[in-house]
Protein backbone atom coordinates (compact mmCIF):
# COMPACT_ATOMS: atom_id res chain seq x y z
CA UNK A 1 0.00 0.00 0.00
CA UNK A 2 2.85 2.34 0.88
CA UNK A 3 4.59 1.45 -2.36
CA UNK A 4 1.53 2.52 -4.39
CA UNK A 5 1.28 5.80 -2.55
CA UNK A 6 4.95 6.44 -3.12
CA UNK A 7 4.55 5.80 -6.83
CA UNK A 8 1.64 8.22 -7.06
CA UNK A 9 3.53 10.88 -5.18
CA UNK A 10 6.53 10.43 -7.46
CA UNK A 11 4.26 10.81 -10.55
CA UNK A 12 2.74 14.00 -9.17
CA UNK A 13 6.18 15.42 -8.42
CA UNK A 14 7.38 14.64 -11.97
CA UNK A 15 4.31 16.22 -13.57
CA UNK A 16 4.75 19.23 -11.29
CA UNK A 17 8.34 19.69 -12.43
CA UNK A 18 7.32 19.37 -16.13
CA UNK A 19 4.10 21.39 -16.18
CA UNK A 20 4.86 23.69 -13.25
CA UNK A 21 6.94 26.20 -15.29
CA UNK A 22 4.33 26.08 -18.07
CA UNK A 23 1.53 26.79 -15.62
CA UNK A 24 3.45 29.68 -14.11
CA UNK A 25 4.12 31.08 -17.57
CA UNK A 26 0.41 30.77 -18.44
CA UNK A 27 -0.67 32.60 -15.28
CA UNK A 28 1.73 35.46 -16.02
CA UNK A 29 0.47 35.70 -19.60
CA UNK A 30 -3.16 35.53 -18.42
CA UNK A 31 -2.59 38.34 -15.97
CA UNK A 32 -0.95 40.38 -18.69
CA UNK A 33 -3.53 39.69 -21.44
CA UNK A 34 -6.15 37.01 -21.07
CA UNK A 35 -6.95 36.90 -24.82
CA UNK A 36 -3.35 36.37 -25.77
CA UNK A 37 -3.00 33.72 -23.10
CA UNK A 38 -6.11 31.88 -24.31
CA UNK A 39 -4.88 31.92 -27.90
CA UNK A 40 -1.43 30.62 -26.93
CA UNK A 41 -2.91 27.89 -24.75
CA UNK A 42 -5.24 26.76 -27.56
CA UNK A 43 -2.31 26.64 -30.00
CA UNK A 44 -0.29 24.60 -27.51
CA UNK A 45 -3.14 22.12 -27.06
CA UNK A 46 -3.65 21.83 -30.83
CA UNK A 47 0.05 21.20 -31.43
CA UNK A 48 0.09 18.57 -28.73
CA UNK A 49 -2.89 16.75 -30.22
CA UNK A 50 -1.26 16.83 -33.65
CA UNK A 51 1.92 15.15 -32.38
CA UNK A 52 -0.18 12.63 -30.47
CA UNK A 53 -2.04 11.66 -33.65
CA UNK A 54 1.19 11.28 -35.59
CA UNK A 55 2.55 9.01 -32.88
CA UNK A 56 -0.61 6.87 -32.91
CA UNK A 57 -0.49 6.52 -36.72
CA UNK A 58 3.14 5.39 -36.60
CA UNK A 59 2.32 2.85 -33.94
CA UNK A 60 -0.59 1.56 -36.02
CA UNK A 61 1.54 1.18 -39.15
CA UNK A 62 4.19 -0.72 -37.25
CA UNK A 63 1.59 -3.15 -35.91
CA UNK A 64 0.38 -4.17 -39.39
CA UNK A 65 1.87 -7.43 -40.73
CA UNK A 66 4.30 -7.09 -43.58
CA UNK A 67 3.21 -8.61 -46.89
CA UNK A 68 6.04 -10.90 -47.92
CA UNK A 69 4.19 -12.53 -50.83
CA UNK A 70 5.72 -12.39 -54.27
CA UNK A 71 3.97 -10.56 -57.04
CA UNK A 72 3.90 -11.98 -60.53
CA UNK A 73 4.87 -9.68 -63.30
CA UNK A 74 2.60 -9.03 -66.30
CA UNK A 75 2.98 -11.74 -68.89
CA UNK A 76 2.91 -10.48 -72.49
CA UNK A 77 2.58 -13.04 -75.27
CA UNK A 78 4.64 -12.19 -78.34
CA UNK A 79 2.85 -11.84 -81.68
CA UNK A 80 3.12 -14.96 -83.81
CA UNK A 81 2.17 -15.65 -87.38
CA UNK A 82 -0.26 -18.55 -87.79
CA UNK A 83 0.67 -20.84 -90.61
CA UNK A 84 -2.24 -22.24 -92.60
CA UNK A 85 -2.19 -25.59 -94.33
CA UNK A 86 -3.96 -24.32 -97.44
CA UNK A 87 -3.23 -20.98 -99.05
CA UNK A 88 -5.77 -21.22 -101.85
CA UNK A 89 -9.12 -22.85 -101.26
CA UNK A 90 -11.19 -23.80 -104.28
CA UNK A 91 -14.69 -22.43 -104.27
CA UNK A 92 -17.47 -25.02 -104.41
CA UNK A 93 -19.03 -25.53 -107.78
CA UNK A 94 -22.26 -23.69 -108.38
CA UNK A 95 -25.28 -26.01 -108.50
CA UNK A 96 -26.95 -26.60 -111.80
CA UNK A 97 -29.80 -24.29 -112.53
CA UNK A 98 -33.09 -25.86 -111.71
CA UNK A 99 -35.57 -26.01 -114.50
CA UNK A 100 -38.34 -23.52 -114.32
CA UNK A 101 -41.64 -24.77 -113.07
CA UNK A 102 -43.83 -25.98 -115.87
CA UNK A 103 -46.84 -23.75 -116.07
CA UNK A 104 -50.09 -25.57 -115.59
CA UNK A 105 -52.51 -25.24 -118.47
CA UNK A 106 -55.20 -22.73 -117.82
CA UNK A 107 -58.70 -24.11 -118.03
CA UNK A 108 -61.48 -21.93 -119.25
CA UNK A 109 -64.14 -23.01 -116.77
CA UNK A 110 -66.39 -19.98 -117.22
CA UNK A 111 -69.88 -21.28 -117.95
CA UNK A 112 -71.40 -20.39 -121.29
CA UNK A 113 -75.05 -19.58 -121.28
CA UNK A 114 -77.11 -22.06 -123.19
CA UNK A 115 -74.44 -24.78 -123.46
CA UNK A 116 -75.69 -28.17 -122.36
CA UNK A 117 -72.99 -30.36 -120.88
CA UNK A 118 -75.27 -32.94 -119.38
CA UNK A 119 -74.08 -36.55 -119.30
CA UNK A 120 -76.09 -39.73 -119.18
CA UNK A 121 -76.69 -40.86 -115.61
CA UNK A 122 -74.84 -44.14 -115.05
CA UNK A 123 -76.43 -47.04 -113.23
CA UNK A 124 -74.58 -48.00 -110.10
CA UNK A 125 -74.26 -51.62 -109.04
CA UNK A 126 -74.78 -51.87 -105.28
CA UNK A 127 -74.16 -55.60 -105.04
CA UNK A 128 -72.19 -56.37 -101.86
CA UNK A 129 -68.68 -57.70 -102.10
CA UNK A 130 -65.92 -58.83 -99.80
CA UNK A 131 -63.51 -56.03 -100.73
CA UNK A 132 -63.22 -52.59 -99.17
CA UNK A 133 -64.39 -50.83 -102.38
CA UNK A 134 -67.87 -51.62 -103.62
CA UNK A 135 -68.29 -52.55 -107.25
CA UNK A 136 -69.94 -49.89 -109.36
CA UNK A 137 -69.97 -47.98 -112.64
CA UNK A 138 -67.96 -44.85 -113.30
CA UNK A 139 -69.34 -41.61 -111.86
CA UNK A 140 -68.59 -38.11 -113.22
CA UNK A 141 -66.85 -35.89 -110.67
CA UNK A 142 -65.80 -32.81 -112.63
CA UNK A 143 -67.58 -31.18 -115.58
CA UNK A 144 -65.97 -28.79 -118.04
CA UNK A 145 -67.68 -26.17 -120.18
CA UNK A 146 -66.19 -26.26 -123.69
CA UNK A 147 -64.91 -23.10 -125.34
CA UNK A 148 -67.31 -21.92 -128.03
CA UNK A 149 -65.52 -21.87 -131.40
CA UNK A 150 -65.00 -18.29 -132.53
CA UNK A 151 -65.83 -19.05 -136.13
CA UNK A 152 -69.18 -20.61 -135.15
CA UNK A 153 -69.91 -17.76 -132.77
CA UNK A 154 -69.25 -15.13 -135.45
CA UNK A 155 -71.51 -16.94 -137.93
CA UNK A 156 -74.24 -17.65 -135.38
CA UNK A 157 -73.93 -21.43 -135.76
CA UNK A 158 -75.28 -23.72 -133.03
CA UNK A 159 -75.28 -27.48 -132.67
CA UNK A 160 -73.73 -30.35 -130.74
CA UNK A 161 -70.88 -32.86 -130.86
CA UNK A 162 -70.65 -36.40 -129.46
CA UNK A 163 -67.21 -37.56 -128.31
CA UNK A 164 -66.08 -41.06 -127.29
CA UNK A 165 -63.16 -41.56 -124.90
CA UNK A 166 -61.56 -43.95 -122.40
CA UNK A 167 -61.83 -43.59 -118.60
CA UNK A 168 -58.62 -44.84 -116.97
CA UNK A 169 -58.13 -46.60 -113.63
CA UNK A 170 -57.37 -43.22 -112.01
CA UNK A 171 -60.47 -41.53 -113.41
CA UNK A 172 -58.77 -39.43 -116.08
CA UNK A 173 -59.84 -39.32 -119.73
CA UNK A 174 -57.77 -40.54 -122.69
CA UNK A 175 -58.22 -41.06 -126.44
CA UNK A 176 -61.03 -38.56 -126.96
CA UNK A 177 -62.33 -38.80 -130.52
CA UNK A 178 -65.40 -37.16 -132.09
CA UNK A 179 -68.14 -39.54 -133.15
CA UNK A 180 -70.75 -37.15 -134.49
CA UNK A 181 -71.12 -33.44 -135.13
CA UNK A 182 -74.34 -31.67 -136.05
CA UNK A 183 -75.24 -28.04 -136.73
CA UNK A 184 -78.68 -26.64 -135.98
CA UNK A 185 -80.74 -25.01 -133.27
CA UNK A 186 -81.01 -27.47 -130.35
CA UNK A 187 -83.69 -25.30 -128.74
CA UNK A 188 -86.08 -25.68 -131.69
CA UNK A 189 -87.76 -29.13 -131.93
CA UNK A 190 -88.51 -28.60 -135.64
CA UNK A 191 -84.87 -27.94 -136.56
CA UNK A 192 -83.38 -30.22 -139.17
CA UNK A 193 -79.76 -30.87 -138.17
CA UNK A 194 -77.03 -31.14 -140.77
CA UNK A 195 -73.65 -32.80 -140.30
CA UNK A 196 -70.74 -30.46 -139.48
CA UNK A 197 -67.37 -30.65 -137.76
CA UNK A 198 -67.04 -27.11 -136.42
CA UNK A 199 -67.62 -28.25 -132.81
CA UNK A 200 -65.55 -31.45 -132.88
CA UNK A 201 -62.21 -29.97 -131.77
CA UNK A 202 -63.68 -27.92 -128.91
CA UNK A 203 -65.66 -30.93 -127.68
CA UNK A 204 -62.59 -33.22 -127.79
CA UNK A 205 -60.45 -30.75 -125.82
CA UNK A 206 -63.16 -30.33 -123.19
CA UNK A 207 -63.57 -34.12 -122.87
CA UNK A 208 -59.88 -34.56 -121.95
CA UNK A 209 -60.42 -32.31 -118.93
CA UNK A 210 -63.26 -34.37 -117.47
CA UNK A 211 -62.73 -36.28 -114.22
CA UNK A 212 -64.49 -39.50 -113.17
CA UNK A 213 -64.63 -41.92 -110.31
CA UNK A 214 -63.37 -45.08 -112.07
CA UNK A 215 -65.40 -48.22 -112.52
CA UNK A 216 -64.84 -50.82 -109.76
CA UNK A 217 -64.93 -54.54 -110.51
CA UNK A 218 -64.13 -57.05 -107.74
CA UNK A 219 -62.70 -54.23 -105.67
CA UNK A 220 -60.29 -53.05 -108.37
CA UNK A 221 -60.50 -50.00 -110.68
CA UNK A 222 -60.70 -50.91 -114.39
CA UNK A 223 -60.55 -49.00 -117.66
CA UNK A 224 -63.70 -48.31 -119.61
CA UNK A 225 -63.42 -47.70 -123.37
CA UNK A 226 -65.76 -45.98 -125.82
CA UNK A 227 -67.59 -43.83 -123.29
CA UNK A 228 -69.87 -41.38 -125.20
CA UNK A 229 -70.41 -37.80 -124.11
CA UNK A 230 -72.49 -35.08 -125.76
CA UNK A 231 -71.55 -31.38 -125.74
CA UNK A 232 -74.29 -28.96 -126.84
CA UNK A 233 -73.41 -25.49 -128.14
CA UNK A 234 -76.15 -22.82 -127.90
CA UNK A 235 -75.68 -19.10 -128.47
CA UNK A 236 -77.20 -16.65 -126.06
CA UNK A 237 -79.91 -14.43 -127.55
CA UNK A 238 -78.99 -10.74 -127.68
Image (cartoon, grey):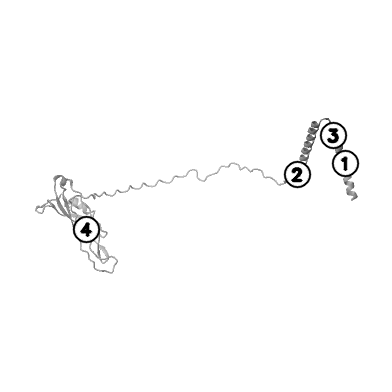
Secondary structure beneath disc 1?
A: helix
Estimate the x, y position of residue 71 in percent, counting from the top left.
68, 45
Instruction: Please tell me which of labels 3 and 1 falls first in the chain.
Output: 1
Residue annotated with mark 2:
60
Seen in the picture, residue 137 relative to 78 is either above or below; the reply is: below
Q: Which of marks 4 and 3 is in front?
A: 3
Measured Cα–Cα span from mark 4 to mark 2: 115 Å
Q: Residue at x 87, y 37 (%)?
A: 20
Instruction: Please tell me which of labels 2 and 1 falls first in the chain.
Output: 1
Q: Nearer the viewer, mark 3 or mark 2?
A: 3
Disc 3 crowd, CA 10 A, few/some/many (<14, 14-19, 20+): some
Residue annotated with mark 1:
14
Residue found at the very far top of the displayed protein: 32
Residue annotated with mark 3:
27
CB contact under 8 Å: marks 1 and 4? no
Measured Cα–Cα span from mark 3 to mark 1: 20 Å
Instruction: Please tell me which of labels 4 and 2 falls first in the chain.
Output: 2
Instruction: Please tell me which of labels 3 and 2 falls first in the chain.
Output: 3
Which label belongs to residue 166? 4
CB contact under 8 Å: marks 2 and 1? no
Instruction: Please tell me which of labels 4 and 3 falls first in the chain.
Output: 3
Q: Is residue 76 left or right of residue 66?
A: left
Determine which quarter of the picture holds residue 135. Answer: bottom left
Estimate the x, y position of residue 123 in percent, counting from the top left.
20, 63
Amino acid sequence: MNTANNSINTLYQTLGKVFGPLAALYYKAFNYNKYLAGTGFAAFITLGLFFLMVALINLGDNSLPTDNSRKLGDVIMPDRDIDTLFDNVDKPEEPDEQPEDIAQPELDLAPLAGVDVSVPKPKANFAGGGSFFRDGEYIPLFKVTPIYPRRAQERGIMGYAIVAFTITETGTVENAEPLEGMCGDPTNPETVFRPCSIFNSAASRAALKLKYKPKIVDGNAVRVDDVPHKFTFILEET
